[in-house]
Amino acid sequence: MNTQPIERIEVDEKSGLFLEIYYDESAENPRDNSDSLGTLYGTPTRHPIRVGGDAGADDGLTYDEWSAVPERYQEEHSLEEALCEGHRRAGNIFIPLSFDYDGLQECSEDTADAILYVRKDKLLKEFNKKRLSQSLRETGEKILRAELSEYQAWQRGEVYGYVIRDRCGEVLDSCWGFYEDMDYCIGYGMEEGSALCGEGGGGAG
């Protein structure tokens, strides 16, 4: 943990509690979370080492789904474009991504280094549906973008935690793993600090 907080806020003057906000330097890669709906696959022809991808991930297409992409299309386009076309024809939801100095970003299919996707059958099973409606497709896209945003925050180091101390510097509470939204971390910490004030926290004067 950094020795100097990003922010130090007085929770309550009478109790002497302070909320300190830090970067969470031990934050876990959210792509290691097995509960993720989407799968991140780093394509092998661009920057597979820098892009990485989920452990054990594959391109997400069956042999028949790959075969549905016309041979001429595969000859005239990059592997990444053909991969996106295969997912499109299979009815899957996907986001093409490229690597730059800020991490993975959404991009056009012809410049993709990676793809974040969820197969149609997985999405239907997740929501116990038999048909992929437009509403469900939009829900799937929203979840994928939320997962991407969380991963981008981790890549940029924008993960936070808080520590609540009394006037003597003793730690009364802490919580970590707030991805991207420092304001939410502060708000949550302030609520917990106020609750501690109600319990009589504050230490010796």
Image (cartoon, rainbow, N blue to C red):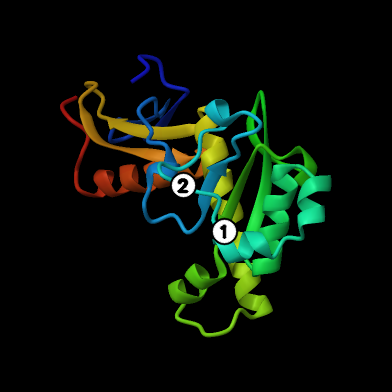
Label 1 packing within 10 angstroms: few (<14), some (14-19), many (20+): some
Q: Secondary structure at mark 2?
A: loop
Q: Nearer the viewer, residue 53 or 171?
A: 53
Residue for badge 1: 61
Quarter of the figure with the C terminus: top left
Which residue is found at the position 31% from the left and 35% from the top?
Answer: 14
Label 2 packing within 10 angstroms: few (<14), some (14-19), many (20+): few
Disc number for residue 28: none
Contact check, label 1 and label 2, Cβ < 8 Å: no
Quarter of the figure with the N terminus: top left
**In the figure, residue 196 lies in which quadrant?**
top left
Looking at the picture, how far across and down is residue 77, in whole percent? 80, 45
Q: Would residue 108 be visible to someone looking at this image?
A: no
Question: Does 166 appear above or below 74?
Answer: above
Amino acid found under the numbered disc labelled 1? Leu
Q: Work out which residue is located at the far bottom of the displayed protein and give it.
A: 130
Q: Would residue 74 be visible to someone looking at this image?
A: yes
Residue for badge 2: 57
Looking at the picture, how far across and down is residue 87, in whole percent? 65, 60
Q: Secondary structure at mark 1?
A: loop
Looking at the picture, how far across and down is residue 33, in whole percent? 38, 48
Q: Work out which residue is located at the far top of the displayed protein and give it.
A: 3
Q: Nearer the viewer, residue 89 or 92?
A: 89
Which residue is found at the position 60% from the left and 68% from the top?
Answer: 139
Amino acid found under the numbered disc labelled 2? Ala
Give the total of numbered labels. Answer: 2
Looking at the picture, how far across and down is residue 180, in whole percent? 53, 39
How far is disc 1 from disc 2 in space, using C-alphas?
Answer: 11 Å
Q: Work out which residue is located at the far left of the displayed protein and give it.
A: 204
